[in-house]
Image: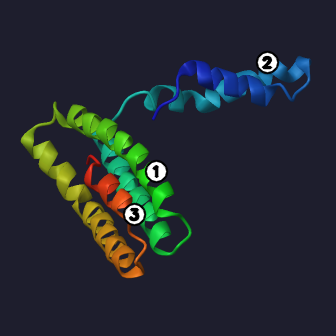
Amino acid sequence: MGKSILSYEFMIHRLSARFSSDIHMKHRTFLLILLCPFLFSSCRDTPVKVQEDRVEYMEDFTKIINKVADGSMSSSDAAKKIKAHGKKGEELLKRTEASVKDLSPEQRKALEDKYVEKHMKAFKEYVQAVEKLKQSGRATQELADAIENMKE
């Protein structure tokens, strides 16, 4: 998600605080110019950014499942993470709807075509992780319920 201009100002202040006061303003101005493109582009979702976030969301979810399957995370801890991850999914769903509402059918199709392979790859990896989890015997009802109640 985008950061507010105030948070960038704070970051610039922290970075430039290390310099002496006579060159402080030069560096502060330089850092502000350097970060300027991010100040304005990161505040608004684009359909492409949202699609990339959707792929990342599924990849993150798959990582949680894989950690349970390989024993590096407990099923209970994973259930908690999945519940929190589900809330991110609800937000992502709203962002997805908002990002494509003004697109023409042709633009939507082009966006879908551009990301279909990435979405399918992420989904395939998710299915493999679930199979790995089933075979590991580490799945619990708590984890199954968390997955079942997840959005997106």
Looking at the rendered image, the disc whose residue lies closer to the viewer, 1 or 2, is: 1
Residue lying farthest to the bottom in this orientation:
135
Q: Is residue 111 left or right of residue 26?
A: left
Q: Nearer the viewer, residue 134 or 39?
A: 134
Q: Secondary structure at mark 3?
A: helix
Q: Amino acid at mark 3?
A: Thr
Rounded to the nearest angstrom, the CA distance separating label 1 from label 3 is: 12 Å
Earlier along the polypeptide chain: callout 1 or callout 2?
A: 2
How did the renderer colour the structure?
Answer: rainbow
Q: Residue at x 28, y 65 (%)?
A: 123
In the rendering, which numbered label is found on residue 62? 3
Q: Secondary structure at mark 2?
A: helix
> Disc 1 marks which residue?
81
Which-is-in-front pick, marks 1 and 3? 1
- Relative depth, front residue between 75 and 81: 75
Please give the residue where the numbered disc 2 appears in the rendered image: 25
